[in-house]
Image (cartoon, rainbow, N blue to C red):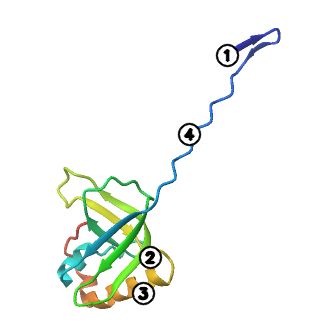
Amino acid sequence: MTQTSAGPIAEPEPKPEPKPVTRPAVISHAIRDRDALYMAYMPFLLHGGIFVPCQRDAELGDEVFLLLSLPDDEQRYTVAGHVAWITPPGTARCEGIGVHFPDDDAGKRLRARIEDMLGTMLASDQPTHTL
């Protein structure tokens, strides 16, 4: 504080350092069978999502560019999503991140394709990588 004849004057708070601009992480992931797809799919997210086992430093909200291959599907799906789930190392579950699909055509197509592939498995109460 600075002292004046009128009394103490508070020093202005320093401005926080701006967060460095980083490029989104690029993750390539292949899911080999329907059981693995069921374990990874995150239908409880607003636009759907997928759990990706990995050892990657991430924070909730980080942008991720995902290249995803699904079982028995020659198409490779690309979506720009955001980290919505983190399972850190040392837990009883598989370490990795959950990527929330975007609310765009690519995200909607991927969600529809996954739900079509899983069919009645979506109603299962078997545990997954996330819940």
Amino acid type of disc 4?
A: Glu
Q: Earlier in the sequence, mark 3 or mark 4?
A: 4
To which residue does mark 2 refer?
A: 47
Amino acid type of disc 3?
A: Arg
* Element marked by disc 4: loop
Q: Whole-Å distance between the Cαs marked 3 and 1?
A: 58 Å
**Horizontal relation, residue 57 to residue 18: left or right:** left
Q: In this view, does 112 lie above or below 95?
A: below
Single out the residue that lies furthest toward the top. Answer: 5
Amino acid type of disc 1?
A: Met
Quadrant for the C terminus, please. bottom left
Q: Which of marks 1 and 4 is nearer the N terminus?
A: 1
| Image spot of residue 126 (x, y percent) | 19, 75
To which residue does mark 3 refer?
A: 109
- For the point 44% across and 80% down, the residue is 107
* Element marked by disc 1: loop
**Horizontal relation, residue 44 to residue 105: left or right:** left
**Mark 4 surroundings: few (<14), some (14-19) or many (≥20) residues within 10 A:** few
To which residue does mark 4 refer?
A: 17
- Residue 69 vs residue 112, the one in the foreground: 69
The mark closer to the camera, 2 or 3, is 3
Q: Whole-Å distance between the Cαs marked 3 and 4?
A: 39 Å
